[in-house]
Image (cartoon, rainbow, N blue to C red):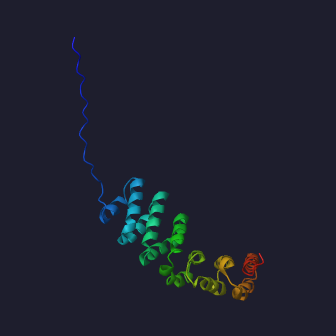
């Protein structure tokens, strides 16, 4: 009996890979709204190469549910780092989403040139929460005027929470010549016991006694 010849296995012909989205700006913007978070995350990262994508990235932030995609969007906005980025992130300071607010603060802290000429408006905003976030931005803003801006808040702002936030931040970067202005806050808010504690703590740190 002859041997039965084994049937040869032949691989099925491979199908050509078809991209769902193009890698140009329009394709990436479309992918930014894909149903899959992984696809959106890659689109967000690749859009870092397109300064024209700032508006779309900021808009996506406001509806994006996945934290890893949000992180990728923030990273791309920081890479782009233009005036448009600051303009697009500042409205997030008014939102209810703490994650978006904190992310916006962190990026804005790293854009001193773009934020510098916008900080006066933020510190004069009618919403004290926005003014507090502005002080938070100043805390780590690599701008030579940041301490002076915070001192101006201490001297003039009428909301105790904004003032004590500024005092707390000045405890880290304040200088001895700021001591009288910080000390004077006790007289401005005599019925707020926390003010005294905040002032004393800040002065100890500034003068090297704490």
Q: Position of residue 116 (x, y in %)?
A: 51, 82
> Can residue 94 be seen in the rendering of this structure?
no
Residue drawn at x 48%, y 58% is 68
Q: Position of residue 110 (x, y in %)?
A: 52, 74
> Can residue 108 be seen in the rendering of this structure?
yes
Q: Quadrant of the N terminus?
A: top left
Height in image: 12 above or below 113? above
Residue extending furthest toward the left: 2
Height in image: 100 above or below 130? above
**Quick one: 162 or 142, which is closer to the camera?**
142
Residue drawn at x 64%, y 87% is 156
Report which quarter residue 134 is drawn in: bottom right
Q: Quadrant of the C terminus?
A: bottom right
Number of marks present in the image shown: 0
Q: Is residue 32 left or right of residue 116?
A: left
Q: Is residue 147 left or right of residue 7?
A: right
Residue extending furthest toward the top: 1
**Quick one: 52 or 36, which is closer to the camera?**
52
Q: Is residue 104 left or right of residue 15?
A: right
Residue extending furthest toward the right: 209
Q: Position of residue 23 (x, y in %)?
A: 31, 61
Report which quarter residue 81 is drawn in: bottom left
């Amino acid at each position: 009996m002859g041997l039965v010849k084994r049937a040869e296995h032949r691989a099925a012909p491979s199908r050509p890979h078809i991209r769902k989205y193009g890698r140009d700006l329009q394709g990436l913007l479309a992918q930014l709204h894909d149903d899959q978070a992984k696809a959106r995350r890659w689109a967000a990262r690749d859009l870092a190469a397109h300064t024209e994508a700032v508006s779309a990235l900021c808009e996506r932030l406001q509806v994006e549910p996945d934290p890893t995609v949000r992180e990728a969007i923030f990273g791309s906005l920081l890479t782009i780092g233009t005036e448009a980025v600051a303009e697009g992130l500042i409205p997030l300071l008014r939102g209810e989403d703490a994650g978006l607010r904190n992310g916006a603060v962190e990026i804005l802290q790293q854009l001193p040139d773009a934020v510098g000429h916008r900080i006066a408006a933020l510190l004069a905003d009618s919403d004290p929460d926005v003014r507090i976030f502005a002080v938070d931005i100043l805390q780590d803003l690599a701008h030579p005027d940041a301490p002076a801006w915070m001192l101006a808040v201490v001297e003039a702002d009428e909301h105790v929470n904004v003032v004590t936030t500024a005092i707390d931040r000045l405890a880290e970067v304040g200088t001895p010549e700021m001591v009288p202005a910080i000390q004077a806050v006790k007289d401005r808010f005599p019925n707020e016991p926390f003010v005294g504690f905040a002032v004393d703590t800040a002065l100890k740190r500034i003068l090297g006694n704490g």
